[in-house]
Image (cartoon, helix red, strand yellow):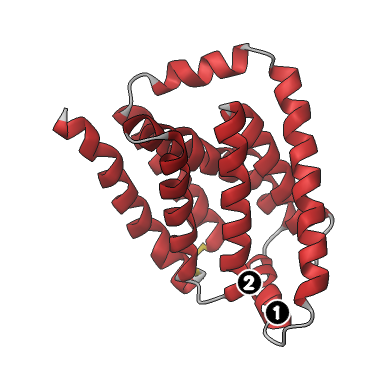
Amino acid sequence: MIAERFRPWALMALALAMFVPLFVTGGLPGFDFWWWMTTNALVLVSLACFSDKKYIDILREDLSQNAWKKIGMGLAAAVLLYFVFAAGNYLAQMFPFAKSGIAGVYGLKHGISSARIGFLMLLVIGPGEEILWRGYFQRVFSTAYAPFIGLVIATFFYVAMHIASMNIMLVVAAAVCGGFWGLLYLKYRSVLLNVVSHTAWDIAVFLLFPFS
């Protein structure tokens, strides 16, 4: 029992160890941010599924129940979150650091094929982050402690890893997104819904309708 309760904390420590250097450096030469993010997601999701033997069954059950409804709700949630950010982007222009912070976020795609970024977001990064942060961490900590405590723990560490970037706008964005998707998962308990919301929002903000 003690070992089982320790596993998610050990995986959280590993997630921070893998993501913090990514956000500190923004990616290393020959191993850019997007490949690094993809690798982290694949490794950590694999470990999460290995750590929790029931997780695959939970994901299968989620996919088998009202999938189209969840997809529609996820898209609607992505649209809502996009407009929240559109309003936030307008208000942020009042702060002198905002423009450089936003430019820093979009600088992560400089010189990288939009097709590759979109492909990785669609197949790995968007799904992987929700499978890991909400579907695994938030669910496991909610079970171990309480639903709202699980949300707080998962969101806190999700935001904490972004602090390493030293980009205030990225940290604020992570806090808004982490809280939004955490509440979404708290209410509907659907990884599929969250995956659709996260992935659609990523592609809209970074590729289709960017703010910079």
In the rendered view, does 114 fall on the left or right side of 49?
right
Q: Which of marks 2 and 1 is nearer the N terminus?
A: 1
Q: Is mark 2 on a helix, strand or loop?
A: helix
Compared with residue 86, is residue 8 higher up or lower down, i.e. above or below?
above
- Tell which of 190 and 46 is nearer to you: 190
Please tell me the numbered disc located at residue 169.
2
Residue 193 lies, with reference to residue 157, above or below; the image says above
Q: For mark 1, does the 10 Å Cα neighbourhood hold few (<14), some (14 to 19), or many (20 or more) residues?
A: some
Which quarter of the figure has residue 83?
Answer: bottom right
Q: Where is residue 47 shown, x and y percent of the image? A: 34, 36
Q: Name the residue under label 1.
A: 98
Q: Position of residue 11 (x, y in %)?
A: 31, 44
**Residue 210 visible to an observer of this rendering:** no
Q: Among all residues in the image, which is located at the extreme left?
A: 2
In-image side of 143 versus 124 (left or right) = left
Along the line of sight, which residue is nearer the eye, 86 or 187?
Answer: 187
Residue 41 image offset from top left, x and y in percent: 47, 45
Judge by depth and name the residue closer to the eye, 62 or 2. 2
Q: In this view, does 124 lie above or below 202?
A: above
Give me the residue at 62% from left, 52% from top: 177
Quadrant (top left, top right, bottom left, bottom right) of the C terminus: bottom right
What is the distance, in whole Å, between disc 2 and disc 1 at their CAs?
Answer: 6 Å
Residue 198 appears at what percent x and percent y? 65, 43
Cβ atoms under marks 2 and 1 closer than 8 Å: yes
SS for callout 1:
helix
Residue type at mark 1 is Ala
Give the camera-side residue of 136 and 38: 136
Whether residue 94 is visible to the viewer of this picture, yes or no, is: yes
Residue beneath the point at 66% across and 72% down = 107
